[in-house]
Image: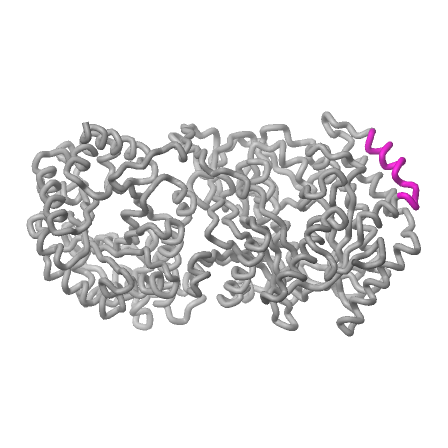
Amino acid sequence: MSSSPFVIPFSQLRNTDVAQVGGKNASLGEMLFSLGSKGIRVPDGFATTAFAFQYFLKENKLDEPLQQLLDTLDTAAFSNLNEIGAKARELVLQATMPDDLRQAVIVAYENLCATHNRTLEVAVRSSATAEDLPNASFAGQHDSFLNRKGKDDVVHAVQLCFASLFNSRAIKYRHDNGFEQMKVYLSAGVQMMVRSDISCSGISFTIDPESGFRDVVSVAGCWGLGENIVQGAVNPDEFYVFKPTLAQGKNALISKKMGSKAKTMCYAAEDSGHSLVNIDTPEEKRRQWVLSEAEITTIARWSVIIEQHYGMPMDIEWAKDGISEQLFIVQARPETVHANASGQLHTEYTITQKGERICAGSAVGNGIAYGRARILQSPAEAHKLEAGEVLVTDITNPDWDPIMKKAAAIITNKGGRTSHAAIVAREVGAVAIVGALDATEKIRDGQLITVACTQGKTGYVYDGKATWEEKQIDLSAIKLPETAPMLIVADPDKAFRLAAYPNQGVGLMRLEFIINNSIRIHPMALVKYPVLQDKDAIQMIDDITYLHTDKKQFFIEQLSQAVGTIAAAFYPKDVIVRMSDFKSNEYANLIGGREFEPREENPMIGFRGASRYYNERYKEGFLLECAAMKKVREEMGLTNVKLMIPFCRTVEEGQKVLSIMESAGLQRGKDGLEIYVMAEIPSNVLMAKEFAEVFDGFSIGSNDLTQLTLGLDRDSAIISDLFDENNPAVKSMIAQVIQTAKACGAKIGLCGQAPSDDPAFAAFLVQQGIDSISFNPDALLKGIENMLAAEDAKQA
């Protein structure tokens, strides 16, 4: 250990030194010492000690004046909080840095510069610790000062860090958490600056920060210095990497979402009087990814190593040096919101009535809040926000913390899932929407609004008071039936949260939702892009696919990431993906679709399903679907994905489709690939034995099977009362196909609403010996209840 009582080099610090230098600096030393051999780069530096801070106060005789000042704090309404904080900081900043402490900082800085053969720019960051509880977290309460250069600038920045112990937010935090105000000390970490001002920086979590799902690393990044992403000043690029297949050496990047990255924080000109400036990001850089896929993987791999070293989920800051092009870890702390939560209590929300949608953004939390909107420009307007109102603002930083705890919900124009507003909202259990872009313009001050974060990663703001129902469920108390309950899933944004439900995997994943919502373009319009006739379609395709010169790759990438996200959420349980099953009229509504689709009188029983896949009108589009599934299974390593063919009229059709799939690298049986067929046409039932020789199993599509058994159009309101899965003819069909499948040793399940709505129908399926039943998420728990009752009755 260093002989100086004031300064300790990072290289001599370990996690056991938290009481001397706070968690942030102790962690940097720990990583520098323990993880460098594993390839993780941490910028060098040193830390001032808690003793140095105490010595500074003692030599300037500040202990008593500060204590007396803090004793006058209004701890009921905190009406004088800002005034007390300002006076306390003024006392610290007007004090003199003792010569011996000043000299110790200068020597440490000069030694750091000498080691690296140049006068260094450094970041000076605050790291607090409590005398009675050295492991307490004070994340985000104190200040950091970037791009400091020269001994006098560094010493001044250390004193600024000391003063930041008395930020209004830090004083309030200590009071709220029961710390004696003068028993918390400040250590300043002085660390080599990574030149991310001319590159990029960001945050990674070794857990999904929204749902708490533990098998992913979430990486977010922006151009320039990382303060923009921490404060939520930009909407960043966001990436998800799946840990289990990352460990297998696969391409584990399952999701990429480009942010607008509107601002870039960089060094200011030396004669400007400022150290930093926030500039508008050039348009061409906004439309570029901040990291390559190899770099994303490196950050994810490092994040997992750090998590394993500390034995807990971690919140990590990274930066890329624009000169050396190397990545660095500049900070790591425990993630505390989800890591300590059991995740077993779940509340289901069902909105029954809502007003007009005002705006939308990234959802934080799972819940709904209602209140009067209060638009604030800065924390100085805190007095305008009444408890229970909805805080609406452009952006937040730690100065907003005392205010945010009063709000029923929080809405910001800027920021992503790892922004300050999002992190604080999770900590205080508030509903929030970040990155809503124009919320402060679209929402009126004083307007009554509902903030709903119940539909995956997108949160919505509605005019007026919505009505909704809440149901709290202890997921750990739910017993699973022997018949496998599976989910019907379409939206990858909801996958991590849905994976916590009691289930045996995904019995039906529809590709149509992904194609309709994420891709929006007809597959053949991408295949035939160079010869498209529709000029409007060409322009829209160009706007959507600007990152891809080969337009087909856009389809493959988007589809594989969506399927990969759902497959990762439920891994290693089966996820059965049904290849696209649009009707021709639905395909025609996709961008560029009208050039490729026939006009049909009855699309429901026309050019759909398997018949499309080998037809020259669509075969090349089907091959894109196959390429995406091959990528998911082989490159991403998600071999729990099984495939299913819809609306396959004849055995010969099935053989043709399987032949095309095999030519595309999807060979049945290879690496455990199973391919199922929908049982939704009477021919599937009557020829079930022959279909079972071609496919691995069946999934009963009860809607189409009812329609085609009874010869009715399920879209016709006139005869809708005849549509009934309980019709004896339909049940006879279902019973027959189940019995044939079981006799052939083929798996068989059913996906539909009836088993949750109707206990008798669930009992019928269980009695027939069906292997699985798949439910929409809102029907799953009721469906499990019906299945358990049916199994009990069967045994009685």
Please report the residue visible at 72 percent of the width from the left and 43 percent of the height from the top.
134
Residue 445 on the magenta segment: no
Give the percent coordinates (x, y) of residue 680: 15, 47
Q: Quadrant of the C terminus?
A: top left
Location of residue 377 by image quarter: top right
Outermost residue, top direction?
Answer: 76
Q: Is residue 721 visible?
A: yes
Q: Nearer the viewer, residue 572 or 449?
A: 572
Q: Main secondary structure of the magenta part?
A: helix
Residue 45 % position (x, y): 74, 62
* Location of residue 79 with respect to 660 vertically, above or below: above
- What residue span does the magenta drawing correspond to? 58-71
Picture coordinates of residue 506 (x, y %)? 31, 47
- Dividing the picture into quarters, in which one does residue 795 lie? top left
Left or right, 486 with respect to 153, comes to left
Q: How is the image coloured?
A: one colour
User: Which residue is found at the position 84% from the left and 55% from the top?
Assistant: 156
- Which part of the image, by quadrant, shows the N terminus? bottom right
Q: How many marks?
A: 0
Q: Residue at x 58, y 30 (%)?
A: 389
Q: Is residue 365 left or right of residue 234?
A: left
- Residue sitting at x 40%, y 50%: 569
Q: Is residue 712 visible?
A: no
Instruction: Tell which of 584 and 38 is nearer to you.
Output: 38
Quarter of the image where one finds residue 731 = top left
> Where's residue 287, x and y in %?
51, 63
Q: Is residue 201 above or below residue 499?
A: below
Q: Nearer the viewer, residue 233 or 156?
A: 156
Q: Is 423 displayed left or right of 693 in the figure?
A: right
